[in-house]
Amino acid sequence: MTRQLTTLARKKIVVSALEDIKARDIVAIDVRKITSMFDWIVIASAESARQTKALARHVHDKLREAGITIVGTEGEASAEWVLVDTGDIV
């Protein structure tokens, strides 16, 4: 039986993945009292579209390695912004 990771453990994976690729201005916002759509929003800045893509891909890969299902990814084509949705963390 596989162990389910808590939302806080998932958030830690996301923040750690962003730090690995040198994201700037990483902020994790607890939105549980504001919306029922998800629990956390993690926002980070990048130096370029190329780094934005690399950040999104690294977060995606680290979450998959941990066995976390990715609900969807948006914005990768232009990479001005990228959203990676895990259901409880965006």
Image (spheres, rainbow, N blue to C red):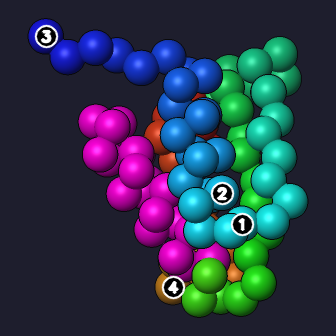
Alpha carbon distance from label 3 to label 4: 37 Å
- Which numbered marker is on residue 23? 1
Specify the quadrant of the image occupied by residue 34. Answer: top right
Q: Nearer the viewer, mark 3 or mark 1?
A: 1
Q: Classify 44 as above or below 46.
A: above
Label 3 close to label 4 by CB (< 8 Å): no
Q: Nearer the viewer, mark 1 or mark 4?
A: 1
Determine if residue 85 is in view: yes
Looking at the picture, how far across and down is residue 90, in whole percent?
62, 44
Q: Within 10 Å of the Cα at label 2, are there few (<14), some (14-19), or many (20+) other Cα atoms?
A: some
Q: Earlier in the sequence, mark 3 or mark 1?
A: 3
Q: Is residue 65 magenta?
A: yes
Give amino acid for label 4.
Ala
Label 1 close to label 2 by CB (< 8 Å): yes
- Which numbered marker is on residue 19? 2
Judge left or right: residue 81 versus residue 57: right
Q: Earlier in the sequence, mark 3 or mark 4?
A: 3
Q: Earlier in the sequence, mark 2 or mark 4?
A: 2
Q: Which residue is mark 3?
A: 1
Q: Residue placed at 72% from the left, 66% from the top? A: 23
Alpha carbon distance from label 2 to label 4: 23 Å
Specify the quadrant of the image occupied by residue 71. Answer: top left
Specify the quadrant of the image occupied by residue 12. Answer: top right
Looking at the picture, how far across and down is residue 41, in whole percent?
72, 41
Q: Earlier in the sequence, mark 3 or mark 2?
A: 3
Q: Which residue is mark 4?
A: 77
